[in-house]
Each structure stands twice: as C-alpha cells, then as structure tokens.
Image (cartoon, grey):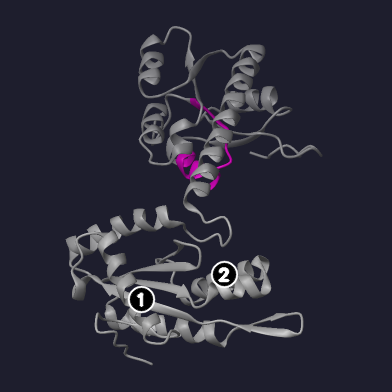
Amino acid sequence: MTNKTAKKSGPLPLILLVEDSHTTTALLSKYLGSHYRLLHAEDGVEAWRILEEHPEIDLLLTDINMPNMTGHQLLVKIRKSEEPHFQNLPVIVMTTAEDNVDRNLAFLNGANDFITKPIDEMELLARVNVHHKLSRTIRELEESQRALAELATTDPLTKLKNRRAFFDNGAKYLSLSKRFESDLSVILLDVDFFKKINDTYGHQVGDEALLMVARILIELTRDVDTVARIGGEEFAVLLPDTNRLGSAVLAERIRAAIEKEQHVVGDKIVSMTVSIGIASLRTDAPDSVDQMLNVADTRLYLAKKSGRNRICVNDEGKTSFA
C-alpha cells in the first residue's frame, strides 16, 4: 500500500493494517490515510515479516480470520517475542459485532482493544489515536530505560564500560568458560606516573591521556571483549576464549602502542607508558572475577616493581616479552 506523503514537521505515525479483504482495506485507508502512514499485509505471515523489517511501526490493526496465519496466531507470536517493542506494541482487533468468542480470545492473547465491523470512522479514529499516544509513551519510556542502563554501565569520560559492567560481564563469561571448559583471561593495566602527568600538565591533559589509552584499547580488541575503566588511571580487558599466551601477545601490543603514541602539549611532547598484569582461567583457576582481577593486580604490581613499562604473566614477575 502506498504511504501518504510526510508532513514537513516529520513523517506521520506508522500503522500496520492486516486485512485480506480489499474492500475493508480500501475503506480503512480512506479513514486513516490523512493522519497515518499505512503498511498493509494480507495475512499474519506477511504481517510478521513487515513487523521485523519496520521496528518504527506504532500500532497494529488486524482482522482475525485470515489465511496462512490468523489474527489470533499473530497475536500470540507478537506477545511471546523476546523483543520489548513487540511485547508492548498496541494491537487493535477487528471483529463482527456478535463475535464475542473471537473478541474474548483476542483479549486473552494480548489484544489491547477491538473495533466492530462494519467500521465507524469516528470510532476507528478515536481508538487508534488513543493507542497511538500510548505507543509513543511506551516507546519514550523504553528509550529512557535504555539510556539509564547505558549511563549505569558506562564510564562518563572514556565511554568505556565501568567497573560494575566489567564485573557483570566477567561473572557471565566466567560461568560460561567453566561450563564449556573454554579459556578466559583478564588484562589489567595502569598508566605509569599518571599523577606526574596531571601535576605537570593539568587535569585536562591527564583526561586526554586517558582518552588516548581508551582509543588504543578499543582499536586493538575484539567486539566480544569487554574493555573497561575500573579506576582513575586503571583499565581492564576481559578476553573470552583467550589463553595466557594470547592475552600476553595482546598485552604487549597494547603496551607498545601506548609507548609509541605521543601527545603534543604546547611546545612539549608528552609520552606515556603502562604496566600490565595478566590472569588466565586455565593457569590460575580463580573462583570469581574478583579473584581473577586480584591475580592480575598482583602481577601489575610486580610489573611496576620491576621497572614499569612492561607486562607480567606470573607471580615471579616474569614476562614473555620485555
């Protein structure tokens, strides 16, 4: 079905109409077309495909008796979806006036409202307008919840994960690694002499230095890895399916990249190094993410004690690289 031209203030709200009668479809298009954009499906199978392709749909208006997938089956599929948008999508069912059985079953399956055939234009617009406003309110709440969740797990300066998110992800991956006997490693790094950078050049330069470290960590890690700022100048990387050798190779790449990076402040060049400690599930057998991080922290301390700007992979302070 052809969509109406969007107004200058923005596109009209989008409704999916599921109806196999061309006469009813034409009538509903006439009633709603001035106020809404319409997409059309002739059965539940086509409707489901359109819903997946268009998450911006605000409301579903569906008949009950259709081929391939009925309105009842479509309702059940929508409400059983794991997607919050589908679970909360307003659905108005069209039934005949005397069809109480279908109407009651539709409510049991998750319909929000119904309208009887033959359809009255004013009643249709009133019900659609109410549920469209409800849809918009629900969507705004969902977006607010996502934004709050993001704030709760994100470091405000670097936009990396924060300490809370690191431990949440760590607990999940540690459980999976123990269950499937797979590898898991943690890299813990600390910026060497960071207080001196702050005291000499100011906190703005210090913040820029931390942002540089965050950028390098993101560039050198995978999407599946968890990169977090867990303290002032302390960062941690959670590495699923990575053994001690693999984490040591990555740690050395990170160390070298940060050492090579130079930051110009006025007429001076600020260089920076990091010390890194590593812990791995297979070799260190930690019982928790906290224990794993403590092991990495002990080795980070040994790396600093041994001269800084190096990695440490065991409790003797040894490194595969130097």
**In the shown orientation, is residue 79 left or right of residue 95?**
left
Q: Where does residue 202 sit, x and y in percent of width and height?
A: 67, 69
Q: Nearer the viewer, residue 182 or 316?
A: 316
Image quadrant holding the N terminus, namely top right
- Label 1: which residue? 301
Question: What residue occupies the far bottom of the structure in this picture?
Answer: 322
Q: Nearer the viewer, residue 80 or 200?
A: 200
Image quadrant holding the C terminus, namely bottom left
- Label 2: which residue? 210
When asked about the image quadrant of residue 281, the answer is bottom left
Say few, some or many: other residues with alpha carbon within 10 Å of mark 1 (under 14 / 14 to 19 / 20 or more). some
> How far apart in space, not on screen, are marks 2 and 1 (Cα)?
20 Å
Q: Is residue 51 magenta?
A: yes
Question: What residue occupies the far right of the structure in this picture?
Answer: 8
Q: Where does residue 229 sit, x and y in percent of width and height?
A: 47, 63
Q: Which mark is residue 60?
A: none
Q: Where does residue 112 sit, x and y in percent of width and height?
A: 47, 21
Q: Is residue 84 magenta?
A: no
> From which residue to which does the magenta span run?
46-62
Residue 33 visible: yes
Q: Secondary structure at mark 1?
A: helix
Say few, some or many: other residues with alpha carbon within 10 Å of mark 2 (under 14 / 14 to 19 / 20 or more). many
Dot 1 amino acid type:
Tyr
